[in-house]
C-alpha cells in the first residue's frame, strides 16, 4: 500500500497529492510517469510524475477530476492509501547538455503540471528558460509561484483575457518569435490541439520541438498496444518509446481521433460513479 502523505487542492477540479513510494522516488526523473490503482477493483490510470523527494521517499502527482477514477481518487484523504503505485515508467526527458541553451517550455491546462518539473530541471541545469502557459481564466491558475522560480521569463495567457493577456500559448510564442527571440528548442505539453498548434508554428521557424504524449494507456509496458502513435510514419508506444517525441513527426490527427474512441464508455463510467455516490449518501443519511 502507498499512503497519501499530503493532499492539496490547487482549485476545484485539480488536486495535488504526495504519495509515499520510496522505490519510485529513488529512480524517478522528469518526464516519467506512474500507473496507479486505488483498490483491487479499480482501473489502472497513468499520471505524470510532477515531483519527487528522494530523502522523504515521496512522489508528487497532480490530477484533474475528469473521469470516474480521478473523481474517486479525489475523495481519498491524507493517511489513506493506494493499492498500486507502479513506476517510474517511460523514458526520462533528455535534459542533459542544455546549459546555455535558450529553451521555451510551453504548457496548457493540466499539461502545466508536467511542464513544471521539466522547466525546473532545465533551469537548474543552466538553460535560459522561458515558460509560456495558458489557462481558460485566472480562476484556474496553478503552480504560479513554482513556475516563476523555474524560469527566467514567465508568460501567462488566458482564453478570456482575465489576467490582461488574452490569447493562446501560440499567441505568446508567435509574439516572442516575431520579436526576434531565437529558441534552440521548444518543449510543448498539454492538450493535443495545443501541441499541434505549437508544432505547426515552430516547424515554420525550424525550431526542434518535443511534445509529451499521453494517449490511452493500460499496462504501461508496451504489451497492450493501447497507447500506440504514429511518429514519422512508424508505430510507437508512448509508454516505452516515450512519452516524449519529436513533435514535427507526430501524426496529431490520428492521435486526436484515437483519444475520442471511448467517450461513450467514459460517460457510462461517470454515470455509475454518480449512482454510487448517491447510494453512499443515502446510506449515510439512514445510518
Image (cartoon, rainbow, N blue to C red):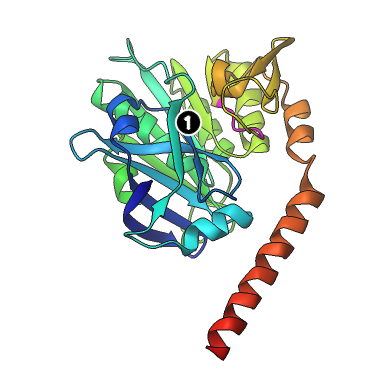
Query: In the image, is 17 to the left or to the right of 67?
Result: left
Query: In the image, is 169 to the left or to the right of 181?
Result: right
List the residue tagged with mark 1.
176
Residue 141 can be seen, yes or no:
no
Q: Is the residue 163 above or below the residue 205 in the image?
A: below
Query: In the image, is 120 to the left or to the right of 234?
Result: left
Identity of the residue drawn at 33% across and 38% down: 51
Residue 245 can be seen, yes or no:
yes
Q: Is the residue 141 above or below the residue 209 in the image?
A: below
Neighbourhood count class around disc 1 (C-alpha, 10 Å): few under 14, some 14–19, many 20 upward: few
Identity of the residue drawn at 79% across and 34% down: 257
- On the image, the x and y values in percent for residue 167 come to 58, 47
Magenta region, residue range? 212-216
- Residue 256 sits in which quadrant? top right
Q: Would you say the magenta stretch is mainly helix, strand or loop?
A: loop
* Residue 277 vs residue 138, the one in the foreground: 277
Amino acid at each position: 500500500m502507498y499512503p497519501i502523505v499530503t493532499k492539496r487542492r490547487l482549485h476545484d477540479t485539480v488536486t495535488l497529492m504526495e504519495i509515499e513510494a520510496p522505490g519510485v522516488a529513488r529512480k524517478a526523473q522528469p518526464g516519467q510517469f506512474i500507473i496507479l490503482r486505488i483498490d483491487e477493483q479499480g482501473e489502472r490510470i497513468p499520471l505524470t510524475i510532477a515531483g519527487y523527494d528522494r530523502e522523504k521517499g515521496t512522489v508528487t502527482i497532480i490530477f484533474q477530476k475528469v473521469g470516474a477514477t480521478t473523481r474517486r481518487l479525489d475523495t481519498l484523504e491524507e493517511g489513506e492509501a493506494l493499492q498500486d503505485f507502479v513506476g517510474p515508467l517511460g523514458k526520462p526527458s533528455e535534459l542533459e547538455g542544455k546549459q546555455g541553451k535558450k529553451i521555451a517550455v510551453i504548457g496548457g491546462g493540466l499539461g502545466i503540471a508536467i511542464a513544471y518539473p521539466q522547466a525546473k530541471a532545465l533551469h537548474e541545469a543552466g538553460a535560459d528558460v522561458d515558460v509560456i502557459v495558458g489557462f481558460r481564466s485566472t480562476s484556474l491558475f496553478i503552480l504560479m509561484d513554482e513556475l516563476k522560480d523555474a524560469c527566467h521569463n514567465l508568460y501567462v495567457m488566458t482564453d478570456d483575457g482575465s489576467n490582461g493577456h488574452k490569447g493562446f500559448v501560440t499567441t505568446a510564442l508567435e509574439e516572442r518569435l516575431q520579436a526576434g527571440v531565437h529558441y534552440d528548442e521548444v518543449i510543448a505539453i498539454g492538450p493535443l490541439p495545443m501541441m499541434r498548434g505549437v508544432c505547426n508554428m515552430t516547424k515554420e521557424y525550424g525550431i526542434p520541438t518535443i511534445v509529451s504524449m499521453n494517449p490511452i494507456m493500460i499496462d504501461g509496458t508496451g504489451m497492450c498496444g493501447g497507447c500506440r502513435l504514429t511518429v514519422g510514419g512508424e508505430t510507437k508506444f508512448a509508454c516505452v518509446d516515450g512519452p516524449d517525441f519529436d513533435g514535427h513527426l507526430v501524426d496529431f490527427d490520428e492521435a486526436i481521433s484515437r483519444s475520442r474512441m471511448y467517450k461513450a464508455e467514459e460517460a457510462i463510467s461517470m454515470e455509475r460513479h454518480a449512482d454510487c455516490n448517491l447510494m453512499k449518501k443515502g446510506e449515510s443519511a439512514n445510518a
